[in-house]
Amino acid sequence: MKVLIATDGGKHSEAALQAVRMLNLQEIEEIRIISVVDMSVPLAIDVYAGYLPSTAEIEEAARENAKNIVQSATQKVLEIAPNINVTSEVLIGSPESSIVETAEQMKADLIIVGSHSYNRWERLLLGSVSDSVVHHAPCSVLVVKTQK
């Protein structure tokens, strides 16, 4: 079985990592952990504050943060499943598309994502990565919910 875990480093993603404990580890041959840097998200920057960072600087900082997130996630998963091949990757783009495309490329059997548990209005305004992944994934999706 090949498992894809998508993480953004938040508490919902932490719950997704811990969901590995629910799986039959003897059946898993590979776990890939990804974090997606979405540069299309508008940033709240005060242009009157003085220094305005370049897009390249912002992207580099976002990549570095995502790299730290996947490294930490990899360590946590290896503590749970030390004998499994665990890889990680930082991607740039739309989280929904990147997760689904990665699952297709690796021929994943399962995707694990955390849910932010948005209410109806938050979902309308912010969108829902997990909802989009559920509807477009080529395989089963485990959406892990946490307490608000």
Image (cartoon, rainbow, N blue to C red):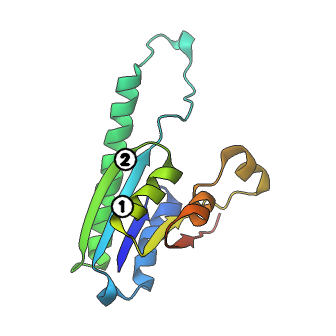
Rendered image: mark on residue 105: 1
Mark 2, Cα crowd under 10 Å, few <14 / some 14-19 / many 20+, is some
Name which quarter of the figure residue 84 lies in: bottom left
Residue positioned 69% across, 57% down in the render:
118
Mark 1, Cα crowd under 10 Å, few <14 / some 14-19 / many 20+, is few
> Whole-percent x and y of residue 7?
44, 58
Residue type marked 1:
Gln
- In this view of the protein, can residue 9 be seen by the observer? no
Does residue 103 lie above or below 35 as drawn? Answer: below
> Whole-percent x and y of residue 48?
56, 10
Secondary structure beneath label 2: strand
Q: Which residue is mark 2?
A: 91
Q: In the drawing, does residue 29 fall left or right of residue 97?
A: left
Pick whichever, 48 or 128, lies toward us: 128
In this figure, what is the number of numbered marks?
Answer: 2
Q: In the drawing, does residue 75 fall left or right of residue 65?
A: left
Name which quarter of the figure residue 58 lies in: top left
Residue positioned 47% across, 59% down in the render:
100
Residue positioned 52% across, 34% down in the render:
40
Quarter of the figure that contains the N terminus:
bottom left
> Whole-percent x and y of residue 106?
34, 65
Quarter of the figure that contains the C terminus:
bottom right
> Whole-percent x and y of residue 136?
57, 62
Residue positioned 36% across, 43% down in the render:
65
